[in-house]
Image: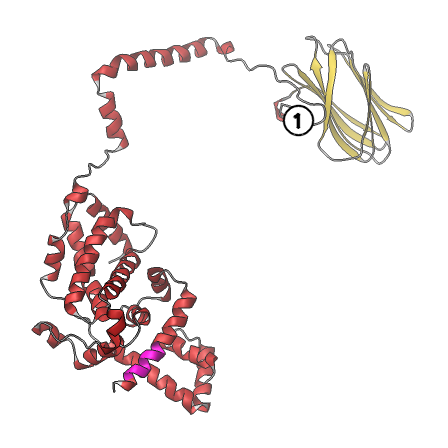
Amino acid sequence: MMEIDDKQIIQQCLNGSKNAFELLVEKYYKVIFNVAYRMTGDSDDAEDITQTVFIKVFDRLADYDYRHKFFSWLYRMVINETLNFLKASKKFKDLNSKMVTTDKNPEQRCIESDLGTRIQMALMKLDPSYRILILLKHFQNCSYKEIADSLNLSEKIVKSRLYTARQLLKDIMIEVGI
Amino acid sequence: MEKKYIQLIHKDLDGLLTPSERQELDTALQADPELQKFSEKLLRMSEQLKQVPLLEPPPSLKQKIVESIDFNRYRAKKTKPALFSRFAQWYAEPRFRLVYGLAAGIIIGILTSLLLFPGLITQPPLQITDLYGTIGIHESDLNVIREYSVDRNSFQGAFKVKTYWNIVGCEISFQTNADTEIQLEYNQALLEFRGITTLESIKTDLKTTPNLITLSASQSGNFLILFEKLSPSIFPITLKINQKDKNIFTQTMTNN
């Protein structure tokens, strides 16, 4: 779907259309859930974050600046929400020892491969500020510009930090035997 | 490992290597086994990340999200009607009809008066505001009432008398290769000298005495000498052009 469609959908949402917002949820809730899950390593937390993000999106929809891409605005919101969540739950401190949650539903367990689980473990050992860069670049296939817009950083800084993040993740993956 | 090649490996991961960079990197990789090992590990990591599938959120999540939204937030806001509808709505108010009638009558009255008596639209006479600078008039506003061309010896030029309301402008433009004196004689009871403008920044000497303006210039020039009318008649005006103390052209303009 093109960006112009997002703007039309948002306009309809602002006119009070429930269907339009459902369309927006349908389009983005999986992406948001995945970013939140990869950041927290917990599907329940990811669900809560996804729900909170959409409530905030709806509340702040009137403030959305049409000059920017909607998904950049959305990513920024999910990133902030996730980082705030991690800070609030003091997970920053013990992330390195945190294991990936195992309380997944059967469907999710089937879908997520063993490699996925181990990579998630490796990701959780990475500092959240680096983890988010890996997620946006390698899981969401964002361009450097899109990442820079979402994180409010310059493209140069994004590149430099991503290079470091990749090298750190590579070392972690070797360490955990991936 | 050189930082430059590490950056090229990262560029390679992003698929952004140019052909020359690719060649440079391949050469470096062949020469440096450590760099090659580093590149392989990074590429392997990137490939493994690509294999991680997108997680399916619980099926109930979408419904939970939609149920948690207060859709009345925006629905409650009354959207602003279009401009035309707002105007139509406003116009339809009966209490304003008398006002509309009066306003329409005034507008029609003014337009009719202007059509019947165009002289009502009069422009106040412009004033010359300073001597050598700002003249409250554009040159193109002046109407030419006399026009002469001069081609004598080494002097080629044109002379025009222009008027606009209470302003009279005598325009002289010329080209010459000798020192030239241009004199303009006028009747100070009919015209009052107010200023001179020049379109080109050239060295000029200006002398004014009652009834006579003398300009000395060489090469070329374009002057507008401005007067204010003191009576409906402005003539006689005499133009004299002298070179080396010798008169080469004289033209006296009269009312006829």
Give the residue drawn at x 50%, y 10%: B120
Q: Is residue B156 or residue B86 the one in the foreground?
A: B86
Kindly identify which residue carries mark 1. B134
SS at mark 1 in the image: loop
Evaluate whether residue B15 shows in this view. no
Give the residue drawn at x 37%, y 14%: B107
Q: Is residue B20 or residue B74 the one in the foreground?
A: B74
Span colored in magenta: A166-173
**Is B3 placed left or right of B69 in the picture?**
right
Chief SS of the magenta region: helix
Quarter of the image with the C terminus of chain A in it: bottom left
Q: Where is residue A20 drawn, in percent x and y?
A: 17, 50
Q: Where is residue B230 drawn, in percent x and y?
A: 70, 10
Looking at numbered disc 1 in the image, what kind of residue is underneath it?
Answer: Thr
Evaluate whether residue A172 shows in this view. yes
Q: Is residue A105 above or below residue B135?
A: below
**Is A19 placed left or right of A168 in the picture?**
left
Q: Where is residue B187 drawn, in percent x and y?
A: 78, 11
